[in-house]
Structures are given as structure tokens and as C-alpha cells.
Amino acid sequence: MEDHFAFLLPIMMFVFGCAFLFAWRWGARNALPWGAGYLCAAIAFCIPVIAPFFPTKFWALLADALFATSFFLYGQGIVQHVGVRGFPRVRVAGWGISVGLCAYAIFGSQSLRLELSASDLGCFFLIALPLCLMAVRMRGGIDRALFAAVTLVALDNLVRGTTVMLTTPSDRPVAFLATEYAFLMQVLASILGPVMGLTALAATILRVVADYQRDAFTDPLTGLLNRRGFWDTITRAERKGRAQACIVICDIDHFKRVNDAHGHAVGDRVIGAFAAMIRDNLPSGAIAARFGGEEFLVHLPDVQPDEAVRFASAVRQAFAREDWTGEGIAHPLTASFGLAEFRAADLSLEAAIERADLAMYEAKLAGRDRVRIMKSSTAQDRDAVTARPPLRLVR
């Protein structure tokens, strides 16, 4: 049975390593350390098979170094997955101490038990530290599954490293594959290795899918939703039932002049700053999107018109107070805002968006740098907009 494991494990680890590298080539950045780790483990598991044909103590040290490297890389995969630095110097120091103790045990004290304990406990440390960082940063079920799988691998190393006196017949060097330790190691590795690999691969692929979805639904310049992302979010929200809401459409005044006079790079920074002001004032549960160019749309659910006015006024005033001299713009920049209420009588949200768009058009005609409300398409008071279509090229 032990011979079967000796041949099976390198193949299994190699397959997982190739799968991770394939995922990395397709854009899964976090897959690279996992793939490299599994390939290191594959080579390490090959050594007990190769060593009898070329007897030397260096094979044992090479195996220990490869196992330590594989666990260092697994830990790197974890910290990249959760998005932290993960104390790289501490983990490198742990790798060095583990391999150094293994070298001393092999060439100095010639203690098999010290070598195995140093290797296993070193691997435990190299993966336990990233696990501690992951414990407070898990997002969703797949992260919890990955945490559980890696925890089992870490505990396997901890238990084996602390029970070597029970699983090795002697402290003197012996044929490794003939020990009970080797049998338990290979049995557990053949179970826990694929479990960890499958969960890590699933977590990596799901992260790629989430990244693609974010890129498809998010405006890269502002970090807000784009038009597609806005409608997708609204559609999912409406499945839970339509609620009263206010729509705010805002547009930076005379923005073309900024681009013409100062260049598109400055214009992009102005748009980014305006988006940040929207985000900073956004109420909980609200949705903000960049609909194109310098135009933004905000959906405020369960908000009354007077609250929407306060939101729009706060953004308008913050933008008008901003100092742009650092960008070479000597005069204040302003924005115009149009508001409309999404009513029960509306057939769709587009009707409220159209009224808000008309209100913004009225704000432009009234002198810009102001907030206007469209209560209905036929209202004649000062907050209403005439029923003619907006001249969308007016800025």
C-alpha cells in the first residue's frame, strides 16, 4: 500500500499544480503560488522513491526544503486571496529556521525525530500565520470552506510533528517509507491535499468570476457602478418589491471647457473627485452610477424629496468649494442637479429618470450650480420643468 501512495501522491500534486498554473494563465493571479506550492510538493513526494537509487543525505534535506517551500507558497496563496501582506519577513524567517533545524538534524545530530518534527512544525507555522490573518477577513461560504480545509492540513502537520516518537521506530536514520510516520503522512496527504486543492481552486476561480463581474459593472475611473451595473442592481432590488425612491441626476457644468483647456487627464481627476463627493454623501442603501461622461445618476430608496434635496445640495456645495488651483484651474467648478420622485403610478423607473433629467435641464437653463425638482411633467411652479424635451448637448 505504501508503494502505491509513494507513486500516487506526486502525480496527484502535479495535476493540482498544473490546474492552478492553467488558471493563472487565464487571469487568476492568486493561483500562481498555489500552483507552485503543489509542484514543490509533487517533487518532494518523489524523493522517497528516487532516494534509494542514489543514496545521499542531501535528498532528505531537499525534501524538507521543498515541503517548507510548498507551505510557504500555500500561505502566500492565502494572504493574496484575502488581500493582505501577510508578514513575509516573518514567514521567510520561519522557513529558514525550519530548514536549518532539518539540516542540523540530518548532518549534525543525525536525529530522524528532530528532522521530522522541525519539518512538520515549520510547515504548521508557515500556514498557521496566514490562517490567522484569513480568520478575520473571510467573505462568503467558499472562504469558510477554504479556511476549514487549510486548517485540517495545518492540524495534520501539528499532530504529526508532536507525535513523531510514536510513529517512528527509532531516532536513528531508517528507511523512511518503512516507518508508520511515512504511511500516515501519505494517507492523510492523499486525502487532505486534494480537499485543500479543490477548495483553493474553487475559491480562486470564483474570485476571478467576481473580478470579471466587477469590471463589467463598475466604472474604472470612479469606482461607481456603470450603466449596466446600475440596471443590474436595480433589477435585483425590484425582485424584492418596488419601493418609493428619489432619483438624482447630476452633471458637471461646462466640463468640455475643462477638457479643452487643461486636458483629459485633469478632466478625469475632476470626474474622480466629483464621484468621491457623491460617494461620501451617499445615504445607506443608495446606488450611485456614472452614466457616461460627466453625468451621474443616484437612486435613493425610501427617501423623501426633501432628503434627496439635502443630499444633492451637500454634494453641490462641496464641489463648488473645492480648490482646483493644483490642477491649474483658477476658477470654481460647479454642477447641476435634477431630482424626481419614483411614484407608484410610474410604469417603470425610466419615467422617474426622465423627469429627473428634465429637472437637470431646467437647472442648466436657470444658470447652473443649482438643484431643481420635477414633481410632474406638467407642473407649472418654479420647481417644475416645461414639458419640452431636454437639449442634452447644453452644458
Image (cartoon, helix red, strand yellow):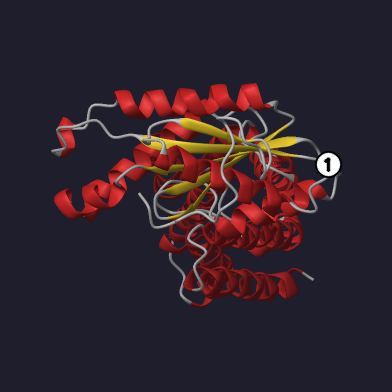
Image height of 340 relative to 314, above or below: below
Is residue 90 or residue 100 the one in the foreground? Answer: 90
The spot of residue 166 in percent (x, y) is 74, 41
User: What amino acid is found at the position of numbered circle 1 in the picture?
Assistant: Ala
Q: According to the image, label 1 marks what residue?
A: 344
Residue 25 visible within the image? yes
| Identity of the residue drawn at 15% across and 50% down | 261
The spot of residue 356 in percent (x, y) is 59, 43
As helix, strand or loop, the secondary structure at mark 1 comes to: loop
143 vs 267, left or right, is: right
Q: Quadrant of the N terminus?
A: bottom right
The spot of residue 214 in percent (x, y) is 56, 55
Query: Within 10 Å of the Cα at label 1, are there few (<14), some (14-19), or many (20+) other Cα atoms?
Result: few
| Identity of the residue drawn at 52% across and 69% down | 43
91 vs 341, left or right, is: left
| Identity of the residue drawn at 86% across and 44% down | 241
Is residue 172 or residue 106 the one in the foreground? Answer: 106
| Identity of the residue drawn at 70% across and 45% down | 156
157 vs 289, left or right, is: right
Image height of 300 relative to 13, above or below: above
